[in-house]
Amino acid sequence: MIVKEWCMYCGECAGVCPRNLIEVRELTLKFTEEHCKECSLCIQVCPVKALEQE
Amino acid sequence: MVIKTDVLVIGAGPAGSTAAKHAASGGAKVLLMDKKSEIGAPKRCAEGVSNGGLESLGIEHNPRWITRELDGVRLIAPDGTNVWLTSDKVDLPEAGCILERKVFDKYMAMDAARAGAEIKIKTLATRMERNDEGFLVDAECMDEKFQIQAKIVIAADGPESRVARWAGLRTAVKPKDMESAAQFEMAGVQMENNKCIEFYFGSVAPGGYAWVFPKGDDIANVGLGILTTITDKSAYEHLLEFVKNCPATQNAQPVELNIGGDPVGGLPKKMATDNLMVVGDAAGQVNPLTGGGIISGMTGGMIAGKVAAEAIEENDFSEKKMKKYEKECRETIGDSINKYLKVKDYMMTLNDDELNSIADVFKDSDFEKVSTGELVKNLVKVSPKALIKLGKLF
């Protein structure tokens, strides 16, 4: 997952990730990519379009 | 290093802090942790609460965290038709106020601390596992890694709701149930009545609404929530468009941008399991129609905190005991959440023309008081479609 630099770490992506793979820290976003099925729900809900499929 | 505690509350928003306060007041050893360096900031909220809600939680108004006392509501239809519900028109307005969340949230955490809770900030829970004594939680604070052994975990980690899922609960939210929201706090906002909260309906915010909530004479939270399942634009793009077109914001400038998700799908099937309770946004404790979740989340937190203290005293952390929280929660806030879920589903079926015609009738209607329930009651009176879907509920 590509996290754009304008990400505001609101965590909405983490809330919809069906596999609970997104860890949102205060100023970083960490994906456990090896388990990601690329459902892209995280990309869909982002309020500022800060996520992009690699 | 392992820190031992009776109750670990993860997340120090209003729901978590309220849970911590009541658990500590009830005699439990409580640890309250939050991943952020400042509790309450950045806000992800339009900051409106009803006075009755604060009262029901036993919280007295404090000028430190109230920015504006409200005098009514203005509803704006897509064609610009106004429905005013103000104290000169309505006898007994159910008044509310606009908070300063970054002060309010800290104040609630301070209350928890005064009740005896220990607070750790800039501390993130990274995983947890169940053991004989409850949960062993991995945590990180700056360069320090440690573990916390808790008999009870109260998951108050907001819309992300990761903690409950570590315990096997299904609290993930589907995009159709997650409002994607964006908001500017602005100065220079020219409101027609700067003591009224404004709601804009229709295609300005597909699947949600736009709002202008006053925080001062010319200061307001201007935002909107949308469902990304029915629009291709992001919440932020919708917000830019709204601010460009809204008469009140033509000369306004932003001083803050807030974004975030708001779970509007109602309560999950299960909010408690052995040694764990979920509260606040993490448990969908939000009015699905308004998206408001401060009071309902704090109510959930209060019940969870009291049950946690009781459980510690009785040394019973079973699912059966934790379910006492769930049962009470469904009784106090669950019924109303279910009702408003149906109203939201109905509102979602209305197009701009239908909203305009409802507003046209509403603008001359007499309302006895200003509340969401009262509005829906009147909606049932004027719309046959609403009567069929909602008549029995309101």
Image (cartoon, helix red, strand yellow):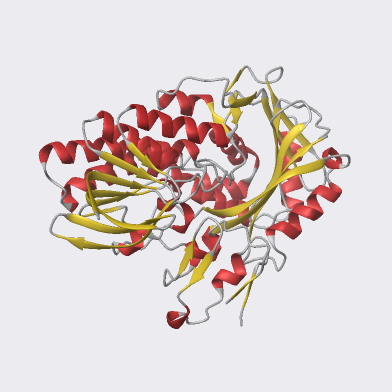
Q: State the residue at coordinates (67%, 22%).
A: B71
Q: Is B221 left, or right, of B124 in this rendering?
A: right
Q: Where is residue B174 in the image (x, y as percent from the top left)?
A: 49, 65
Residue sticking out furthest to the right:
B251
Vertical arrangement, residue B278 with respect to residue B65, above or below: below
The picture quadrant where one finds residue B26 is top left
Q: From the viewer's side, name the closer residue of A44 and B29.
A: B29
The picture quadrant where one finds residue B65 is top right
Q: State the residue at coordinates (77%, 44%).
A: B254
Q: Is A18 left, or right, of A38 in this rendering?
A: left
Tag count: 0
Q: Is B6 left, or right, of B224 in this rendering?
A: left
Residue sticking out furthest to the front:
B143
The picture quadrant where one finds residue A6 is bottom right
Vertical arrangement, residue B2 with respect to residue B184, above or below: below
Q: From the viewer's side, name the closer residue of A30 and B75.
A: A30
Q: From the viewer's side, name the closer residue of B40 and A12.
A: B40
Q: Where is residue B330 in the image (x, y as percent from the top left)?
A: 33, 44
Residue B363 shows in this picture: yes
Vertical arrangement, residue B145 with respect to residue B244, above or below: below
Q: Where is residue B318 in the image (x, y as percent from the top left)?
A: 15, 51
Q: Quadrant of the N terminus of chain A?
A: bottom right
Q: Is B300 left, or right, of A14 in this rendering?
A: left
Residue B203 shows in this picture: no
Q: Quadrant of the C terminus of chain A?
A: bottom right
Q: State the residue at coordinates (70%, 69%).
A: B232
